Image: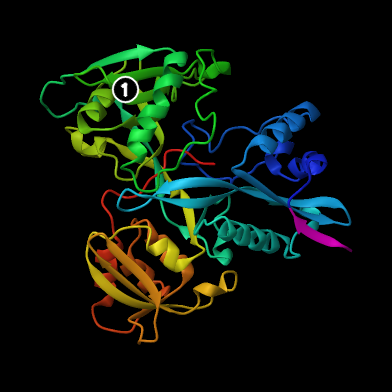
Amino acid sequence: MVTEVRPPRRDEMNAYYRALPFANGLPNWEPADAAWHGGPGPWPPPRTPATAEQLDAWAEADAKDESFHPIATFADGACVGASATISFDVTVPGGGTVKMAGVTATAVIATHRRRGYLRRMMQAMFEAALARGEPLAMLSASEGGIYGRFGFSPATYRVRWELDRHEAALLPAAPDPGSLELVDAAQARQFWPMVHANVRANRIGELTPLPGRWDGLSDDADGTNGPLRYLIHRDQHGLVDGMANFRLPWSSTVGSAGTLVVEAMEATNPVACRALWSVLVDFDLTKTIVAPGRPRDEPLRWMLANPRAMRITRQSDNLWARILDVPLALTQRSYDTAGELAFTVDGDRMCPANNRTWLLRAGGTSVTCTATDQAADLTVTVPALSSLYFGGMSAHDLTYAGHITPHSEGVIGQLARMFRTDPEPHNSFGF
């Protein structure tokens, strides 16, 4: 058998898509309650298999997209595995952005698994990302047990919460100097990019949007779900500083009737945040508010007269991170606590240049990470370092789990103080 791992040609793209579950109407996520799904079921129903016309349209669009980098495995000329990376910028601690390869749409067909094809595609994507100057790779893991062996580890979380309307009273606050307005889809498509850009500048873990991210917003009904509604907040100067998309889906059961689903909500300041939630949690003819894909540290909880009323019903990891170039990645974020750490990375088989002892020095705006011969303060695996990178994971917990080995007293506390961020990292959409 002749096996090739390479980017597919234009005439091979239809076969490339057919190797992916979503193109065939098959499940492409773990059969568990998904924190990104607002409905009462564990996940949305599968889609109808793509038609030849849809496959051709996808191929045309992807061929024109310079940020899309497909890779495929061919066995005796047949496409048996497929994946891709999308080039993003991701916000890191300090407010800067880092180039990142987002791994997406990954599968090996059932008849050709357990042959190392996925590892070979990952290796090819890592090498291509490094050649493009992308020191990070990230993904949303469809199954929790697959991607750790390639160096990925959870970096952000997301939750789905519920709130009964009769328990949703907010604590008193100063009057809002701005205003709220319901708008149509055309206006929402205009305002969302601006709101997202302002939020992204200050949210660690947030991504640059894909082209056409909001083009599909519509005023039309979506089956029995009803149409999306769009709520904006303007500040005292008339500038839009917050938005929400919500819907009131029809239900055939009494238990889930009267549910308002908040599909997206972003605000650039606390006033806009409170004003938007004040409407969303007290909408006429509703009983329950559901918000999927939200940050784990949602500020709304602290605005409620009864904080216990907001119940987290689903929680999952969100983005998994993988550092491809240790010194380049670590010097492109900042550290709130100045310090110096010598750490050893060992066992990175896919990016072997990471395997050595590094000296990280952070002070103010100056950050350096250079190879060193001095004794290491700790040894850390690439997955653990990748989890720590965005500041949302516990150095203490990773140490207890055996992913970090301290070699000197107090070094884990120093590691935690240097890397941890507040608020936790979050991204509002996947890829």
Q: In the visual, does 385 lie left or right of 170?
A: right
Residue 20: image location, x then y, percent: 71, 44
Q: To which quarter of the image does residue 409 belong?
A: bottom left
Residue 178: image location, x then y, percent: 20, 18
Residue depicted at 50% across the width and 15% down the height:
226
Q: To which quarter of the image does residue 127 belong?
A: bottom right
Q: Name the residue under label 1.
A: 280
Residue 269: image location, x then y, percent: 23, 33
In the image, residue 236 above or below residue 52? above
Q: Is the magenta stretch mostly helix, strand or loop?
A: strand
Residue depicted at 58% across the width and 17% down the height:
223
Res. 284 visible in picture: no
- Asked whether 143 or 182 is in front, the reply is 182
Res. 184 visible in picture: yes
Quadrant containing the C terminus in the rendered view: top right
Q: Does the magenta stretch include residue 4?
A: yes
- Asked whether 401 or 358 is in front, the reply is 358
What's under tag 1, amino acid-wise? Answer: Leu
Q: Does the magenta stretch include residue 213?
A: no
Residue 3: image location, x then y, percent: 83, 61
In the image, residue 333 above or below residue 346? above
Q: In the visual, does 316 lie left or right of 274?
A: right
Please report the bounds of the magenta region as a residue range: 1-6
- Asked whether 129 or 104 is in front, the reply is 129
